[in-house]
Amino acid sequence: LVVISVEALVREYGDEVLARRLTQRGLDAAWLQPLRLERKSLAPVGIAAAPTASGQAVSSLLNLLFLPFVVALWVFTGGLDLIVDMTAGEKERRTLEPLLATPVSRVGLLLGKIALSIIASSIVAGLWSLYSLGYLYLFSVLPTDGSERVSLAQGVAGLGRLGTAAVWLMLLMVPLMVMVNGVMAAICGFARSRREVSYATIVLQFLLSGLAFLAVLVVGTAQPGVYALPVVGVLVAVRDLWSRGIAPGMLALAWAAAAGYAAIAVLLAAY
């Protein structure tokens, strides 16, 4: 603390000496920086979260790099262990065979198990979303770079955009979680014990992390085909939704593709 204090005082004194010498020669501080770069964010397009300032997109660096990994983490948070316990665990306890003997279809039985897993995951993701919404709303109403604080009406409008983005976030997360749970249930159906499932879980975690990294590598405006890719399409759509904005048609495409992959995963697990 002493060293930091002394260094701060020395820097402050040096700035005073520099300002005095520049004034004596009729120069200002801008003379020391002949070239200056200014960074401006593009205005959001389509559906987007609230901007940080008028016509600017939210915290693009954080959302472009960090959000895909957070969404991939949400998929493994909360309820994925439940689907393992309700499939491989029931096989070990020998309670799965009586369930399969009931008149309930295998797809219906599997959807019931996945629904419980998604509820647990959604609670965790919902709490994270509320926390993120509060942070982004606070970030959007605070003045930056000497700009004036936004008005109450602008703050309410920004909160509405945040709510719309949050709804789309959950809509995109549901088919993604159904697909991952369906793949995990299919793996549990082939596995002979929960130990084998644990190995597959590690591989699936690395796979999702790699797909999140691919989503980060997609720079600029993504092509429509990117939004139709498994997992990557949802991650890119969520990233664009909370940064530069995304067209409603591309959001619908990402959701429809994710729903299709989720249906395939459920049918595979039921088989």
Image (cartoon, rainbow, N blue to C red):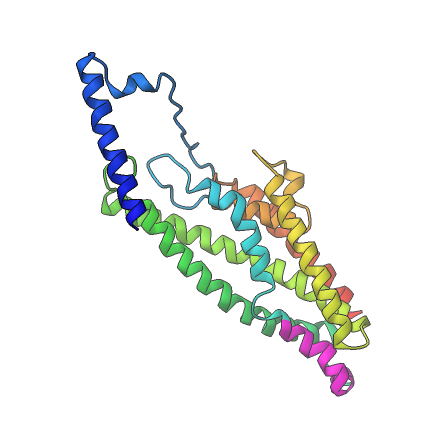
Percent from the top left, x then y, of residue 107?
A: 72, 71
Does residue 199 sit above or below 52 in this rendering? Answer: below
Image location of residue 65, percent across then percent down: 53, 44
Say which residue appears at 69% left-offset and 74% top-offset.
84
Q: Determine whether 253 is above or below 72 in the image.
A: above
Query: Where in the figure is residue 64, as x and y percent of width and height?
Result: 52, 43
Give residue 85's position: percent from left, percent from top: 67, 78
In the visual, does 69 lie left or right of 86? left
Q: Nearer the viewer, residue 9 or 114?
A: 9
Along the line of sight, which residue is nearer the eye, 23 or 133?
Answer: 23
Instruction: Assess whether residue 209 is covered by the magenta stretch.
Output: no
Name the magenta segment's main secondary structure.
helix
Please identify the quadrant where the C terminus is shown. Answer: bottom right
Q: How many marks?
A: 0
For the magenta stretch, what is the residue range? 81-100
Residue depicted at x 26% and y 21%: 29
Residue 98 lies within the magenta run: yes
Residue depicted at 42% across the width and 33% down the height: 43
